[in-house]
Image (spheres, grey):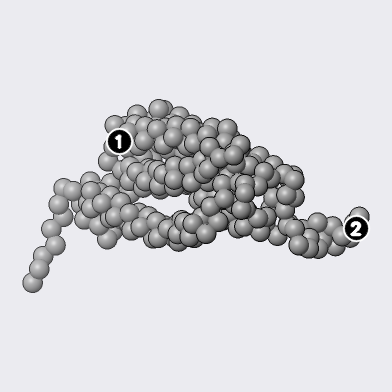
Amino acid sequence: MIEAHATTEDVHAHPALQHHFENMEQQREAGTLGMWVFLVTEIMFFGGMFLAYTLYRSLYPWAFASASNHLDITLGAVNTGVLILSSFTMAMAVYFTQIGKLRPQVWCLVLTLVLGLTFLGIKGVEYYDKYEDRLIPGYLIPSRPFGPAVQQEGQPFDEHKLHLLHGATVRQVEMFYWIYFAMTGMHALHMIIGAGLISFLIYFSLRGRYDPEYHSPVEVVGLYWHFVDIVWIFLFPLLYLLGRHLEHG
């Protein structure tokens, strides 16, 4: 017959400890492992889009360079700096949580959220510019005032807005923008999810839920945020810097 003995750790268990874990350290390790497994699936997901980009870039190098030169490199660079800074503030939020400094922890989370929203706002400006320049794949225009929208025949883009390099066609440029909107749009969706998670952390941080003994949610969200930032670090040079030296070629 096995007797159950209440240990000191059982009596003084942390309120956040779930019943299926023996202690807080085991719970933290399980959460971290789960996030890493999730991130591996995310790598495979984005990897498919990076593969599509690589294949079509090899097929239409001049068209991809032409389309890339039309992107606003200044806004892209600013967004890159914004995300790098947000990674720093997120890392500091994790650090301050681990050492039990509540006020700096909250401020770093708020700064991370503000920087993330700034990124999304700048990306929205970029999308609007592409809409104004009629560079949206499969662009829809009204056939008559107040009439139904129909797809423009033969030329989905306004080629006068592009400086096509020799050997590039409008249709090939359209493929670049399909990939551009797919990759940056999916990245933006992940940013929106991350902003929601950080808002969740801010709410519970203000209530004093996280402390040096229980800080795994902040660490796990931090891992997710760093992953999203790293994805952009790859997207920026591939989409914005491609063939930049050929702009006046």
Secondary structure beneath dot 1 equals: helix
Pinpoint residue 209: horizontal percent, then vertical percent.
38, 41
Tag 2 residue: 144
* Residue type beneath disc 1: Gln
188 and 3: which one is in front?
188
* Residue type beneath disc 2: Arg
Tag 1 residue: 98
Is 5 left or right of 196, judged from the image as shown? left
Instruction: Give how far apart the Cα atoms at labels 1 and 2 are.
Output: 62 Å
108 and 143: which one is in front?
143
**Residue at left 59%, top 39%?**
249
Q: Quadrant of the N terminus?
A: bottom left
**The residue positioned farthest toward the left in the image shown:** 1
**Residue at left 48%, top 42%?**
237
Pinpoint residue 101: horizontal percent, then vertical percent.
34, 29
Q: Residues within 10 Å of mark 1 (few under 14, many from 20)?
A: many
Q: Residues within 10 Å of mark 2 (few under 14, many from 20)?
A: few
